[in-house]
Image (cartoon, rainbow, N blue to C red):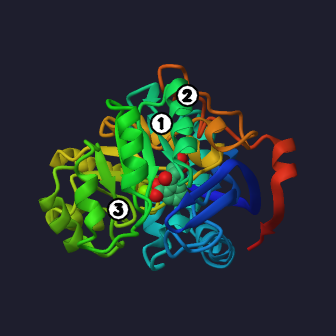
Amino acid sequence: MITLREAELVLVSLPLVRPFKTSFGVQETRDAVLLRVVVSDEGAEAEGWGECVAGREPLYSSEWALGAWLLLQHVLVPMAAASPFESLRSIRDAFVAVKGNPMTKATLEMAVVDATLRARGVSVASSLGGVRDRIECGVSIGMVSSTGALLDQVAGYLDEGYRRIKLKIEPGHDVVPVSAVRERFPSVMLTVDANAAYTPGAPALAHLDTFGLAMIEQPFGEDALSDHAALAASLATPVCLDESITSVARAVSALDARACSIINIKQGRVGGLAEAVDVAALCATRGIPVWCGGMLETGIGRAANIALASLPAFTLPGDTSASSRYFHEDLTEPFVMDADGTIAVPAGPGLGVAPIPSVLDRVTLRRERISW
Ligand code: OSB
Ligand code: MG
């Protein structure tokens, strides 16, 4: 039995190395809710951390940082404290009665998984069924108004070794930057991500089909499965879904509808690591390639992503970039990418990384113990 002994919420704000502009807004800092827990498992006690991927405002999806804070404080943590978990995979079952809020549920799962596996001396990657000790890295590049500056950024990331370049696009900012990058780097694995900014029939989508892109990610809204299916049938470029895939059930619907042929798996968006592993297994069964997405996480959330990306189903380079792509100073020991474009999967117990106390102090905006 896994029993919750302590829980504490921490709100942090870390400056990004450069603003990150997507079709839903510009982020200059990564503002994240962290959850610290202490659990006891068969007599052993250990501390663990979870990071909520939800942004400061509900722009990418309906969840947002302070909403997650309140839900953890008033509902999820008290529920977890009232009934111990039988196993790590059963954590999500404890919250089936709570509607929605996958990112917030995933935060509690991550913290309890980290703490429990620390107590057991097992890494998250091996506990999930990871098979690789290094994962392939791609990089997601925010929109920049100057094409010259964009080309410089792409060249810099390719020099560092990144194996796949993803460009954020929106209507009016698509064909020009994408064609410039494609012309300058004819053979790079190139993808685009619209974060739901297009409407069906937008002429740019057919034009983007001429650049040999490895995929186009989430052109339409979260609920627009049939619009994605119609687009997928009309393009040579594979369609990848991100926002639409919020659970195994939604992944089944999307695949049955032929709405995509690639899935971006984010543990937070689907409600946690157990659900993410199940989405990956579903995709493997259906022959659908997957890759691990990201939400500009600090080292805590990124450690979870990298552990997930070590599973065999993850056959494409993900948005699992080095700490230096996000922060001058990460919250944890930095994740460093080798010149071959790979990052080592943490092998230590739990997530294998934890906040560095002095950095945590410096970036903390608010901290509160949860009592029950
Ligand atoms: O759509 O994949 C996305 C960041 C925040 C919110 C949504 C997305 C992203 C990214 C960056 O593309 C991924 C990363 O490097 O963490
Ligand atoms: Mg995306």
Q: Which mark is residue 125?
A: 1
Element carrying mark 2: loop
Circles 2 and 3, Cβ within 8 Å, touching? The answer is no
Instruction: Check disc 2: other Cα within 10 Å, few if <14, some if 14-19, many if 20+.
Output: some
Q: Amino acid at mark 3?
A: Gln
Tell me: residue 27, above or below residue 125.
below
Q: How many marks?
A: 3
Determine whether the beta carbon of the residue marked 1 sits less than 8 angstroms from the nearest atom of ligand 1.
no
Q: Which mark is residue 347?
A: 2
Tell me: residue 334, above or below residue 256.
above
The image shows residue 187 at horizontal and vertical percentages of 32, 29
Residue at 45% x, 76% y is 100
Quadrant of the image occupied by residue 21: bottom right
Q: CA distance from mark 1 to mark 3?
A: 28 Å
Q: Amino acid at mark 2?
A: Ala
For label 3, the residue is: 218
